[in-house]
Image (tube, rainbow, N blue to C red):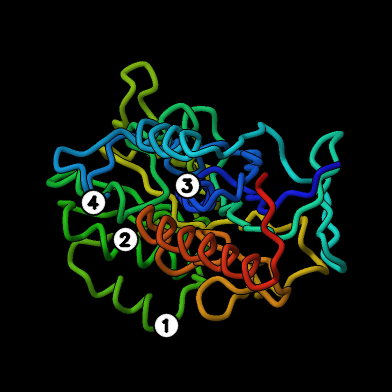
Amino acid sequence: MAIRNVVIMGSGCAGHTAALYAARANLEPLVFEGHEPGGQLSLTTLVENFPGFPEGIQGPELIANMRRQAERFGAEYQLAQVSAVDLSTTPFTLQAGKDTVETRTLIVASGASARWLGLPSEQALIGHGVSSCATCDGFFFSGKDIAVIGGGDSAMEEALFLTRFATKVTLVHRRDEFRASKIMLDRARQHEKIDFITSAVVEEVTDVSKKEVTGVKLRNLKTGASLELPVSAMFLGIGHIPNTKVFEGHLDMDQDGYLKTTDSVFTKVPGVYACGDVQDRRYRQAITAAGSGCMAALEAEKFLGHGGFIDAS
């Protein structure tokens, strides 16, 4: 079995950018696409804040372009998910489906999956008024009423950001008490554009038949009463889940499962790098993910070159 120079886990902005740079360095990278090929951008419609596209570009199209560019220089893609790793010795060993792969360097770009409510109507309207990223999609709902779901700092941050565009933001939380820090909660409560509905859960997002959000149906958990809240968008502020389970016991993580890195992309294991949303819980933007993917690939190239390992014959 040939030992790979670089294996990349994930096929979002970070993974594709890492693949592009590694391929142009003649490292013949192998990319495992993961359980969410394309990452968060594959669930996004119009992307207007990625440099180089003054008229914007559809998220899936941007991802497809990145992949084609990386493949043009020799990156290899496999529709598989890594299920087990051994980072205790080099080369590192990965299990993906029925295949066992050995690699001299590993770039982890497996991303973080947004927490969703799991409602069929919610899932059907993702990208059509249902979003987990206010920074990405808030602008599209200027002058509209918006609902934000959640009770922690993420929800407060989303709600406060969306006041820049919305006529009104209604924050819906299933409890009476909030997990948010006092300073964030106070800011939200003091904002004239933000209203609160507590002890309520979303039962349905309307209107799937129109392929757009026209409102949310709520149920009061104390009284059982139903309420229809007319809004043009629903943003989820209930956090993200980093796709790092396979690295438990192998790499350092914070309390929420995000990989810990130093100098942007270095993990505690030499030759293993992490980039994008799997280690970035602060920015979570396509452009920052792409930048960190570039850094990871450059560091992998440097590592291989210094060790005299590169063999792309």
Dot 3: element: helix
Task: Look at mark 4 in the image and give the residue it sits on.
Answer: 51
In which quadrant of the rendered image does the C terminus lie?
Answer: top right
Q: Which kind of residue does numbered mark 4 sit on? A: Pro
Q: Which kind of residue does numbered mark 2 sit on? A: Ala
Observer-side mark, 1 or 3, equals 3
Q: Quadrant of residue 250?
A: bottom right
Task: Look at mark 3 in the image and give the residue it sits on.
Answer: 20
Q: CA distance from mark 2 to mark 3?
A: 36 Å
Of residues 300 and 121, the one nearer the viewer is 300
Q: Which mark is residue 182?
A: 1
Task: Look at mark 2 in the image and give the residue it sits on.
Answer: 159
Observer-side mark, 2 or 4, equals 4
- Which residue lies at the image location 35% right of the left edge and 56% below the top edge? 287
- Which residue lies at the image location 33% right of the left edge and 48% below the top edge? 147
Q: CA distance from mark 4 to mark 1?
A: 36 Å
Q: In the rendered image of this protein, does residue 187 appear above or below residue 93?
A: below
Q: Earlier in the sequence, mark 4 or mark 1?
A: 4
Label 2 neighbourhood size at 10 Å, few (<14), some (14-19), many (20+)?
many
Q: CA distance from mark 2 to mark 4?
A: 26 Å
Dot 1: element: helix
Q: Which kind of residue does numbered mark 3 sit on? A: Leu
